Amino acid sequence: MQVLTHESRVVTLKESGVATETELASALLKKLAEIVIGGDSVVGIEKDPRSFISFCYPGIAVDATDFDFSYVVPVGEKAVAAADFSALVNSIPSESARFLPTAEKITDIYAEIMRDKQLPQVNLTDSEKKQLAAAEALIIQEIEVVDDATGGIVKVPGDTPLYQKYKEYESAYYNAAAKLRELQARLNYRGDPESEALWALNGENYQAQVQSVFNTWSTLKGKVEQALGTIASLAGRGPEFYWVELLSRFNKSRLSTAIGESYHFTKYFPSGFWNESHAKGWTQFTMAHSEVHTINENSQMSASIGGGWSGGLWSVSGGGSYAEQKTSMESDTEGLNIDLQLTMVPIRRTWLDATIFSNRAWRLDPNINNSVYSDGATPADGKMPAIITGMILAREVSLGMNMTTERNSSFASQLAIKASGGFGPFRVKGSFSRNASRTTHDYVMSSAGINVPGMQIIGFICQRIPTCPNPDTSLNWPE
């Protein structure tokens, strides 16, 4: 294990004046991204160049009832919550803009591919078919459940206990690594005696925790990833029978609420991430006004993350629709101090084999569909340039600033009469309307700032799709 020390600091701190809102927004998003998707020098995992964050403007108010649905087949109100969750996280993110829920979903694109694909003429041997079946059996199993609509028994795809544990350990590792990155960033960008003392007290301990959690994850990592590699290799040759299995799994994962709303069941790891038993999965994140220029000059993260916030960090709107027009207002941020708890929650779609987006053994039938899902560029363009792979949640948000200045007082007056409001990616007040519930955040405002204890989604971890479709012309395609 590589032990980072105080001497590993390479950032030169500088005195600076009051940062502009653009500078502050850039620094905030860069630092959040660094904590969430930065690399890990302890075990040698580098930042994934395909990953980026689509930030909310402002956050989406949520509570436990929005996530407290069965991991197999939800029923009643839990089914409505599951359908709402599926609609949200299966939106198609844009790399060059803030997050907005989209009408077209990943499920629509996946169904289109299933419907309009062409496959090369290829056959697997019986031995290869057995290898593929064995690999799939390590990841996915069929579960018998009661159909809420008919009362009959149906079989639905589900994750094996092995794969569930693998994903839970993965989540624990990434959140342990985030804690270490936050501590290192606090030392590098703030460099005050308190940050130095925290590093001296906790630095080596946090590194040991990252290594320990990674070692636990690794007990399953080799077995699971070998199975995934086998699936990608054999299915990547384009056998018809595997695509028949994909379509069957996709169709069996289509569920309905009591009022007939259809959705493809999507879940997250770990279950109950908001509970006290998962308290260690939350990172204490802070950023002070004094860090802004240092972050902007030294962070390796993209300055275009989230599209920026032109027009002011404060925002207000009159209703509960997330996509509705917001009015932006400028703020006074001198002396700002942001403090909150942060966690990352991976998304799991049992019905989706994401390897098909890089699989070159299929193409769209040129007679019926010429769609481009991704052109593979950075930023990517197409009908589905990226997919959401995880959520970023915050709670106990504290915005320390002078609320008696003209700009901040003006926002406070508007917030009192508007249904919702926020500061950058953080929701201060209001709700996000869903079918299952209407979660509303309460806030406490004083002359020294604003506190928002409730939980909120402040962004989504996304992964770029490579060039898709990208068929290999050397394969034996039908005439």
Image: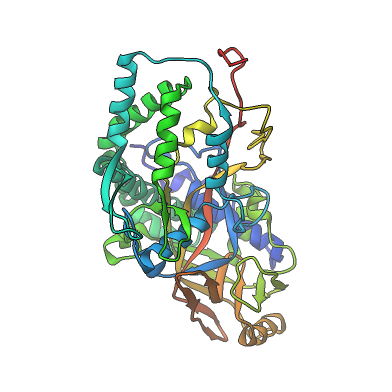
Judged left or right of residue 73, residue 469 is: right
- Residue 298 vs 338, above or below: the answer is above
Judged left or right of residue 54, residue 382 is: right
Where does the N terminus fall, quadrant-wise? top left
Q: Position of residue 137 (x, y in %)?
A: 28, 33
Q: Position of residue 412 (x, y in %)?
A: 63, 84
Quadrant housing residue 424 = bottom right
Q: Position of residue 477 (x, y in %)?
A: 58, 16
Residue 193 in sight from this viewpoint: no
Q: Position of residue 254 (x, y in %)?
A: 43, 49
Quick one: 339 or 51, which is closer to the camera? 51
Quick one: 406 or 236, which is closer to the camera? 236
- Residue 473 vs 9, above or below: the answer is above
- Residue 34 vs 229, above or below: the answer is below
Where does the C terminus fall, quadrant-wise? top right
Q: Residue at x 47, y 41 (%)?
A: 39
Quick one: 13 or 142, which is closer to the camera? 142
| Residue found at the far right of this picture | 311
Quadrant housing residue 293 = bottom right
